Amino acid sequence: MKTILHVPPIAVIGSALFLSACSDSNSLPTEENVALNFAAVIGSDSFTCGTTYSNVGTGLNEWNVTDFRFFVHEVHLHDDATGNQYNVELTQDGVWQYQDVALIDLEDGCGGGNPEMNSQAAGTITIPAGQTLDTSNVSACFVLGVPEALNHLDPASAPSPLNASGMLWAWKSGMKYLRIDGTGDPNGTPVGYNLHLGAQNCPGASATAPPVSACATPNTVEVCIDGFNVSTDSIAVDPKAVLAGNDVSTNLSGAPGCQSFPDDEDCLAAMPKLGLGFDFNNGTVTRSEVAEAQQLFRKQ
């Protein structure tokens, strides 16, 4: 009896290999470069360092702004359609980004700050196999501030950008998460009026040493901008909205403007608009303000 060997046609073998390769390709995760872009504004006006802006605060005063910097961390995109979250692994550039922290610097040194500028938090997201993400319609999210684990590094040896001297408050309290400096009524009776945010109630006897345990009032706040197109939209940062309930020509108590301290009366109106509750106690008067929807950031 004659034995017949059945050999598949070469074309069929090639097609099978091709389909297998395509299947393997579709089952691999993909990486995508993304960047959240920030733009400083004062109300409806674009920010230029050293410029005086009108109609700010309850007295509709002029306010001259000379510094505009802040830290963000835990940057991520949220797909509202699927509920999936995509963490942005920040590019380790040795200057503006370290681990998951980025310094956004929108001033040019006009007030003695840093002449170099950085307007974005940039990195990559990983999209798992079998998932797709439309980055033209996501929630762009981040946390304003510095995480506790990185907020109290030795300022003499901290990596950039956590060694930015203008953003250091004290070793115990850590970094200024947000620094926007200005002068109210600059053409009349000038009054320093700043907006600073940082951790408070950090335990420890010395301001020149890290706290002995976590700060009781971390003052970090998560922000999500809905309906965001990563390629075409930017995030406007508007301190005028935060200071809408403050008279920037009059400092009520303590350091100039609102600087997050528990006895700072100027923070009663401003802190809730950052999305944070505020417990005021000056030794005589105590008062608690409930957080509002944050008003510092919006889509532009």
Image (tube, grey):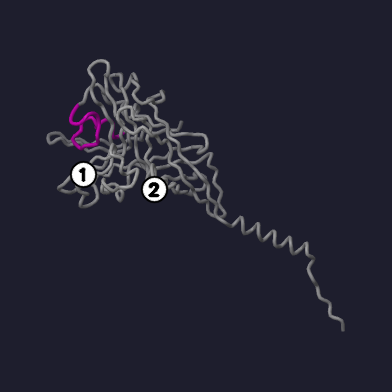
Q: Position of residue 108 (x, y in %)?
A: 36, 30
Q: Residue at x 45, y 33 (%)?
A: 299
**Quarter of the image holding residue 96?**
top left
297 inside magenta stretch: no
Q: Quadrant of the N terminus?
A: bottom right
Judged left or right of residue 278, residue 15 is right
Give the amino acid type for the residue marked by disc 1 in the picture. Answer: Asn
Number of numbered tags placed on the structure image: 2
**Quarter of the image holding residue 162?**
top left
Q: Position of residue 103 (x, y in %)?
A: 37, 40
Give the amino acid type for the residue marked by disc 2 in the picture. Answer: Asp
Judged left or right of residue 140, residue 108 is left
Task: Compare residues 32 and 242 and report the one nearer the observer.
Answer: 32
Q: Residue at x 17, y 49 (%)?
A: 204
* Residue range corresponding to the magenta coloring: 252-272
**Quarter of the image holding residue 247?**
top left
Judged left or right of residue 115, residue 82 is right
Tell me if residue 12 comes above or below residue 256 in the rendering: below
Q: Which residue is mark 1?
A: 201
- Within-10-Å neighbours for mark 1: few <14, some 14–19, many 20+: some
- Within-10-Å neighbours for mark 2: few <14, some 14–19, many 20+: many
Label at residue 100: 2
255 inside magenta stretch: yes
Q: Position of residue 229 (x, y in %)?
A: 51, 37
Q: Which callout, 1 or 2, points to the residue nearer the camera?
A: 2
Per the image, label 2 sits on a secondary structure element best described as: loop
